[in-house]
Image: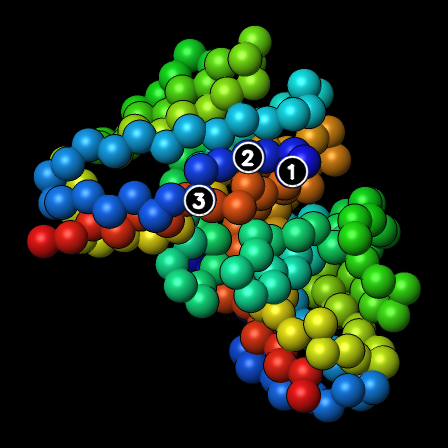
Amino acid sequence: RKEVEQDPGPFNVPEGATVAFNCTYSNSASQSFFWYRQDCRKEPKLLMSVYSSGNEDGRFTAQLNRASQYISLLIRDSKLSDSATYLCVVNDSSYKLIFGSGTRLLVRP
Amino acid sequence: AAGVIQSPRHLIKEKRETATLKCYPIPRHDTVYWYQQGPGQDPQFLISFYEKMQSDKGSIPDRFSAQQFSDYHSELNMSSLELGDSALYFCASRTARAAETQYFGPGTRLLVL
């Protein structure tokens, strides 16, 4: 079983839709949580860190539930440019990143 | 702003050959991480360095070695290459004093024939 689990998708949504991604992690000692975005054949890019109080950055909202070891990402008003793979990532005390397999999002016109 | 630099960007090798991948972290970043991403896979941690010392080790084959130099750049040396080593190799850097965020380089795409 992978340490970070995600629904692989793909999620195929129209422009303007709201889409939610979920992620669970198994290591209760995980310290920090992130959503990264990866475009095809490109490097992962940090989308946002995830905090216990929940946090928002424009159209993106991330939530963390430490008790359930559950992380979510909500994207509102989807744009064509949001099409990418979204990686749920955690790190441990050594700060190395542990990636989920990613969720593919396709936003259609 | 300066980003992480990796070279070469693309590399083609034959089985049993050796390869050296280079990573130049963001200025003033003292910690470097190497990740391997196989086709259709998520990135897997290989090894990391802090202040020129190995700080953590992941699923790195014994055929691979790495080091961080005095100018903080890092090199990943890969010997006796196998077909399964074909992957994207990412380097990421951070500063241990500040945020935990890692910034990724553009990657080196290695193809072993």
Please provide percent x and percent y for residue A54: 39, 17
* Dot 1 and dot 3 residues touching (CB under 8 Å): no
Q: Distance between the residues labelled 1 and 3?
A: 13 Å
At horizontal 30% and vertical 44% (from top left) the residue drawn is A11
Dot 3: chain letter: A
Please provide percent x and percent y for residue B106: 50, 66
Instruction: Determine whether the residue tagged by mark 3 lies in a helix, strand or loop.
Output: loop
* Dot 1 and dot 2 residues touching (CB under 8 Å): yes
At horizontal 41% and vertical 35% (from top left) the residue drawn is A48
Q: How far apart are marks 1 and 2 (CA)?
A: 6 Å
- All told, the count of numbered labels is 3
Which quadrant of the figure contains the N terminus of chain A?
top right
Please tell me how crowded label 1 is: few (under 14), some (14-19), or many (20+) other residues with Cα within 10 Å. few
Same-subunit check for callouts 1 and 2: yes
Q: Nearer the viewer, residue A69 or B89?
A: A69
Res B52 → quadrant: bottom right
Name above or below for residue B12 compared with residue A2: below
Instruction: Determine whether the residue tagged by mark 2 lies in a helix, strand or loop.
Output: strand
Circle 1 sits on which residue? A2
Please provide percent x and percent y for residue A87: 47, 43
Dot 2: chain letter: A
Please tell me how crowded label 2 is: few (under 14), some (14-19), or many (20+) other residues with Cα within 10 Å. many
Q: How far apart are marks 3 and 2 (CA)?
A: 9 Å
Furthest residue in direction top, as rendered: A67
Mark 2 belongs to which amino acid? Glu
Q: Nearer the viewer, residue B83 or B64?
A: B83
Mark 1 belongs to which amino acid? Lys
Q: Residue A8 carries which label?
A: 3
At horizontal 73% and vertical 90% (from top left) the residue drawn is B14
The answer to whether residue A31 shows anywhere in this view is yes
Which label's residue is closer to the chain start, 1 or 3? 1
Circle 2 sits on which residue? A5
